[in-house]
């Protein structure tokens, strides 16, 4: 029922999920779906955080690959 919480609650849950997954190549979803009455703003916020996380991970991957010496 995280999506019924505040933005801070949603943000912390997303960060915890990503941290628990090791921060690499993961799928972040809402589980068994969105129940009726879930605030649309919370769904949009969750989607925004997931996209931002994906963008940040891609930037880290590019930075890491450019720093690694060629073999």
Image (cartoon, rainbow, N blue to C red):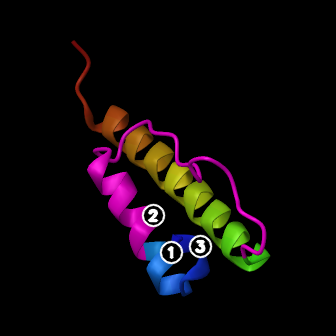
Q: Residue 29 at what x, y percent from top left? A: 58, 49
Tell me the SS state at disc 2. helix
Q: Residue 22 at what x, y percent from top left? A: 28, 45
Outermost residue on the front side: it is: 36
Neighbour tally class for label 2: few under 14, some 14-19, many 20 plus, Cα within 10 Å: some
Is 63 part of what is drawn in magenta? no
Outermost residue on the top side: it is: 71
N-terminal label among 1 and 3: 3
Secondary structure mostly taken by the magenta-highlighted segment of the chain: loop
Left or right: residue 71 versus residue 37 is left
Give the Cα distance between marks 2 and 1.
6 Å
Q: Nearer the viewer, residue 45 or 30?
A: 30
Q: Give the number of the disc on residue 14.
A: 2
Q: Residue at x 47, y 85 (%)?
A: 8
Of tags 1 and 3, which is closer to the observer? 3
Q: Mark 3 — residue?
A: 3
Q: Residue at x 55, y 84 (%)?
A: 7
Neighbour tally class for label 3: few under 14, some 14-19, many 20 plus, Cα within 10 Å: many
Q: Residue at x 40, y 74 (%)?
A: 12
Left or right: residue 61 versus residue 19 is right
Tell me the SS state at disc 3. helix
Q: Mark 1 — residue?
A: 10
Relative to residue 20, is residue 36 depicted above or below? Answer: below
Tell me the SS state at disc 1. helix
Left or right: residue 40 versus residue 32 is right
Is 37 part of what is drawn in magenta? yes
Pointer 1 with pointer 3, Cβ within 8 A: yes
N-terminal label among 2 and 3: 3
The residue stretch that appears in magenta: 12-38
């Amino acid at each position: 029922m995280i999506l019924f919480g505040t933005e801070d609650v949603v943000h912390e849950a997303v960060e915890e999920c990503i941290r628990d997954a090791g921060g690499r190549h993961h799928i972040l979803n809402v589980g068994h779906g969105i129940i009726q009455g879930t605030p649309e703003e919370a769904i949009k916020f969750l989607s925004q955080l997931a996209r931002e996380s994906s963008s940040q991970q891609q930037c880290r991957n590019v930075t890491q690959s450019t720093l690694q010496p060629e073999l």
